[in-house]
């Protein structure tokens, strides 16, 4: 059964409790991040599992869209010493006539759609019950839009008087407040800015500009509310300081499991180009569309043996149809293991022009010693050098030539990929990054 909110309870992690360690932390998120089928889920799951070995974590979230998935995820979390509290509320789908009606209605809201659509009374109730009845050392918001659900919860911690054996909610002095950490997987306003700048339709561009402005205001307020803000790259951290006045944001980079993603004894196909990413995320859909219609045809005109494999979850029907119309292109949807594709291809293509944060797929590729060709936006946020670890083009117009050079010089780019794996192992292993996140948590509580 799915854990519900009738009796929300912070349960000790067996491993953390056995070692006499552990903060009591409530993590708040959109869903249980299992299985790890998207970049956000990969990051969240890997860091949370490692933190649960040292601290006592309760994971509060909305219900996953797939009932079978949420059951498996709840069991998986419980087996790893994490107490899942699943709020019985489903975030609205981003499709159908009702979705467009909600978009129109959002014009009257001060909140961005991505924030307003994730609000629920059930989530607020769950968090209030935990605040009133449990000992909590730290609140951790795992995705910026969910900070709205925590607004005002700080005044409820360990409330004063008792009634029928339970604490009642009351205002507490400042010393009784518990700190809040906000994890910013992206500077969301930057993504909306790039949506706006790349949208050719005037009406859509006007709407996206409203969302961009709303997210700027929301992020400014949210980052000011938090005790600590965690960015996923130095560039995002610098942007928070510059645009929002965030004092000293911490940086915990995106990472990779370097024991799982590693070189395989498989012969590469130099003319095989791989696109890898979630195909229900707009920046990836924009990138793969440009790759199909503008970049790959130019490569194939020069190198007729070139082949493009598109690998990702939940591709829309229109993308499947579009791929079928292109010669030399194959779609592999919802695969169980991406490593064989990374092992066989000649290179990973990352033609992003929209996005923020940093790309886990680049780290996974380099961990497998797979050569990478990326735009500057695709590679931003990563401490990797063009020409030493990967190939970086300034824009999309330079990518066909870069891909052709890689096809013709496989040993050259393979040497870069080997150097890239060395950098990834040294800097981007999840164990190293979990240590950084733990220091953020501990420094908040020790204030």
Image: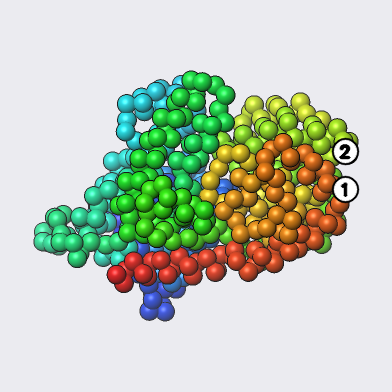
Asked whether residue 31 is in view, the answer is no
Judge left or right: residue 76 versus residue 401.
Answer: left
Residue 109 vs residue 415, the one in the foreground: 415
Per the image, the residue denoted by label 1 is 408
Q: Considering only order in the chain, which callout, 1 or 2, is on the residue closer to the N terminus?
A: 2
Residue projecting furthest to the front: 242
Quadrant, the C terminus: bottom left
Question: Which residue is rendered at x = 36% and y = 51% of the image?
Answer: 245
The residue lying at 79 percent from left, 44 percent from top is: 403
Is residue 357 shown left or right of residue 240?
A: right
| Residue at image point 49% right, 36% down | 193
Mark 2 is surrounded, within 10 Å at the Cα level, by few (under 14), some (14 to 19) or many (20 or more) other residues, namely: some
Q: Nearer the viewer, residue 142 or 254?
A: 254
Q: Which mark is residue 303?
A: 2
**How many circles with numbers are drawn on the protein?**
2
Tag 2–tag 1 contact (CB < 8 Å): yes
Say whether residue 441 is visible: yes
**Disc 2, SS:** loop
Secondary structure of residue under mark 1: helix
Q: Is residue 228 above or below residue 22?
A: above
Marks 2 and 1, how far apart in space? Answer: 9 Å
Q: Quadrant of residue 394?
A: top right
- Residue 117: horizontal and vertical position, in percent? 38, 35
The answer to whether residue 398 is left or right of residue 56 is right
Q: Position of residue 369 (x, y in %)?
A: 74, 59
């Amino acid at each position: 059964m799915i854990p519900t909110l009738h009796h929300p309870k912070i349960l000790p992690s067996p491993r953390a409790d056995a070692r006499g360690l552990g903060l009591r932390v409530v993590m708040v998120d959109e869903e249980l991040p299992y299985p790890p089928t998207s970049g956000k889920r990969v990051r969240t799951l890997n860091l949370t599992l490692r933190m649960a070995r040292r601290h006592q974590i309760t994971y509060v979230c909305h219900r996953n869209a797939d009932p079978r998935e949420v059951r498996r995820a709840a069991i998986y979390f419980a087996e790893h010493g994490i107490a899942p509290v699943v709020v019985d509320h489903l975030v609205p789908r981003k499709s159908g006539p009702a979705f467009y009606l909600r978009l129109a209605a959002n014009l009257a809201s001060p909140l961005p759609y991505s924030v307003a659509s994730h609000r629920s009374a059930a989530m607020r109730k769950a968090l209030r019950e935990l605040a009133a009845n449990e000992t909590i050392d730290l609140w951790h918001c795992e995705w910026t839009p969910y900070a709205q659900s925590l607004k005002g919860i700080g005044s409820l911690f360990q409330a004063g008087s008792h009634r029928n054996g339970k604490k009642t909610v009351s205002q507490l002095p400042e010393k009784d407040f518990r700190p809040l950490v906000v994890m910013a997987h992206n500077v969301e306003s930057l993504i909306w800015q790039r949506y706006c700048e790349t949208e050719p339709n005037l009406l859509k561009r006007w709407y996206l500009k409203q969302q961009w402005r709303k997210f700027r205001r929301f992020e400014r307020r949210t980052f000011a509310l938090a005790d600590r803000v965690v960015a996923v790259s130095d560039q995002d951290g610098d942007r928070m300081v510059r645009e929002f006045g965030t004092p000293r944001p911490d940086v915990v980079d995106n990472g990779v499991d370097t024991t799982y993603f590693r070189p395989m004894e498989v012969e590469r196909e130099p003319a095989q180009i791989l696109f890898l990413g979630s195909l229900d995320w707009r920046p990836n859909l924009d990138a793969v569309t440009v790759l199909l219609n503008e970049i790959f045809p130019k490569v194939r005109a020069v190198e007729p043996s070139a082949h493009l494999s598109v690998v990702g979850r939940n591709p829309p029907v229109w993308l499947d149809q579009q791929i079928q119309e292109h010669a030399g292109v194959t779609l592999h949807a919802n695969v169980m293991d991406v490593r064989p594709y990374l092992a066989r291809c000649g290179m990973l293509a990352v033609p992003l022009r929209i996005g923020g944060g940093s790309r886990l797929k680049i780290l996974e590729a380099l961990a497998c010693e797979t050569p990478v060709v990326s735009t500057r936006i695709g590679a931003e946020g990563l401490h990797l050098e063009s020409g030493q670890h990967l190939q970086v083009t300034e824009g999309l117009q330079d990518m066909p030539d870069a891909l052709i050079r890689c096809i013709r010089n496989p040993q050259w780019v393979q040497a870069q990929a080997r150097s890239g794996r060395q950098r990834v192992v040294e800097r981007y292993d999840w164990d190293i990054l979990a240590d950084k996140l733990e220091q953020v948590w501990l420094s908040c509580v020790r204030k």
